[in-house]
Amino acid sequence: MRELTIDPRCEPEVELLGGWRLLDLAWLPVSDALMRNPYGCKIVECDFFYQIRYIVSESIGKCPALVWSFSIDANKNITIEDIQKYDPY
């Protein structure tokens, strides 16, 4: 079974965005989508050994729209690498 983890380096970003209590509203649908089909998400950066993909969550209540960047390892485990407020052009 695939594992979904969040890199501890994301904690300062999470605190700036309002903490996990607020981001939990967006986390549930994002985690569900990533567990179902992470390969369907767009690739931002790619080289032979490493790929960064992302998924955008909509704003829900007081939680802003967010960009969740993640990687998938050889065992198909997912690691959230970065979380940022989504800023459309």
Image (tube, rainbow, N blue to C red):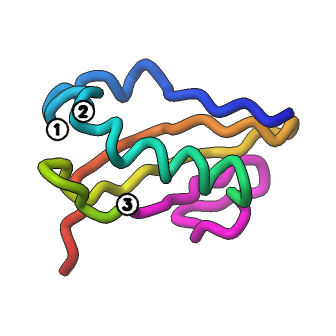
User: In the figure, is residue 75 to the left or right of 29?
Assistant: right
Q: Is residue 70 above or below residue 5?
A: below
Residue type for callout 3: Ser
Residue 53 painted magenta: yes
Residue located 60% across and 49% down the image: 32
The percent coordinates of residue 56 (x first, y second) are 40, 63
Q: Distance between the residues labelled 3 and 1?
A: 14 Å
Secondary structure mostly taken by the magenta-highlighted segment of the chain: strand
Query: Looking at the image, is mark 2 or mark 3 nearer the viewer?
Result: 3
Q: In which quarter of the image is residue 8?
A: top left
Label 2 sits on a secondary structure element that is: helix
Residue located 60% across and 35% down the image: 79
Label 3 sits on a secondary structure element that is: strand
How many numbered dots are placed on residues in this image?
3
Q: Distance between the residues labelled 1 and 2?
A: 6 Å
The percent coordinates of residue 88 (x first, y second) are 21, 75
Query: Looking at the image, is mark 1 or mark 2 nearer the viewer?
Result: 1
Q: Do the residues labelled 1 and 2 touch (CB within 8 Å)?
A: yes
Q: Residues within 10 Å of mark 3 (few under 14, many from 20)?
A: some
The percent coordinates of residue 89 (x first, y second) are 19, 80
Looking at the rendered image, the quarter that the N terminus falls into is top right
Q: Mark 3 — residue?
A: 57
User: In the figure, is residue 77 to the left or right of 22?
Assistant: right
Q: Mark 1 — residue?
A: 17
Q: Do the residues labelled 2 and 3 touch (CB within 8 Å)?
A: no
Residue type for callout 2: Glu
Q: Quadrant of residue 22?
A: top left
Residue located 36% across and 56% down the image: 67
